Amino acid sequence: MRQGRSLVILAVAGALVLAACGSTSKTVSTSNAPTSTVHVAIPVKATPSVSAKMVCEHEVQTEIAGLVGEKPNQPIAPTWKDHVYSCTYHYKDGSFTLSVKELADRADTDAYFNGEAQKLGKTQNIAGLAQGAFTTPNGSAVVRKDYKVLLIDVSKLPAHFGNPPDTRGNIALNVAATIMSCWTGA
């Protein structure tokens, strides 16, 4: 039952946080029109985007340490291969991996996201988080935003982890909400 409540709370909290930050914007103005801000989605490039790299940077490491009540016992070592930026957070009792797949456009993103749902086994949609999200049988979470798909793979964590202990699924959801709260399209 705790998992179901977490999804509802996550959806409400995520929607509120996402309203405060989370996208690359451009100010658009014409001589006769008021200034407005529009969101710009950035397609994959030869190097990882700022938002992809964010999942392995010190600020997110600090946020995650606060969420799980533990710090990694090894340095975070990001990799970039086949348009996937990833890093593993190693702890004494297990690890989890964050990976961001960058794609060229909406059609590619839709296909990849749906393919991950089939491959990993979607168990539940997560309402209100980015532009689509779901959980998997092992508690992992997959989130899409713009032309990126984030995987929080908690399969190598024990069933209960952290200080205080929490379920793998709740950890994945909390990490997803934290990252999405300020994930830009850049």
Image: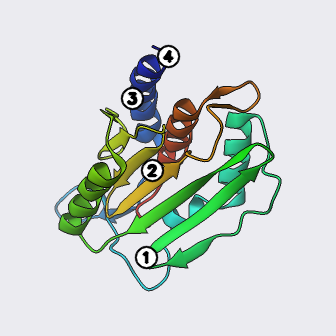
* Image coordinates for residue 84, horizontal then vertical, percent: 47, 71
- Say which label, 2 or 4, has the lower sequence index: 4
- Say which label, 3 or 2, has the lower sequence index: 3
- Say which label, 3 or 1, has the lower sequence index: 3
**Residue ID for mark 3:** 11
Residue at 48% over, 39% down: 138
Q: Is mark 4 on a helix, strand or loop?
A: helix
Q: Disc 2 or disc 4, which is closer to the eye?
A: 4
Figure quadrant of the C terminus: bottom left
Amino acid type for the residue under numbered disc 2: Gly
Label 2 and label 1: CA atoms lie apart by 21 Å
- Say which label, 4 or 3, has the lower sequence index: 4
**Residue ID for mark 1:** 83
Q: What element carries label 2?
A: loop
- Say which label, 2 or 1, has the lower sequence index: 2
- 9 sits to left or right of 57: left
Q: Nearer the viewer, residue 77 or 20?
A: 77
Q: Residue 115 carries which label?
A: none
Amino acid type for the residue under numbered disc 1: His
Answer whether residue 36 is visible to the viewer in this image.
Answer: no
Q: Nearer the viewer, residue 171 or 33?
A: 171
- 90 sits to left or right of 159: right
Q: Disc 3 or disc 2, which is closer to the eye?
A: 3
Q: Residue furthest top?
A: 1
**Label 3 Cα neighbours within 10 Å, binned few <14 / some 14-19 / many ≥20:** some
Q: Is mark 3 on a helix, strand or loop?
A: helix
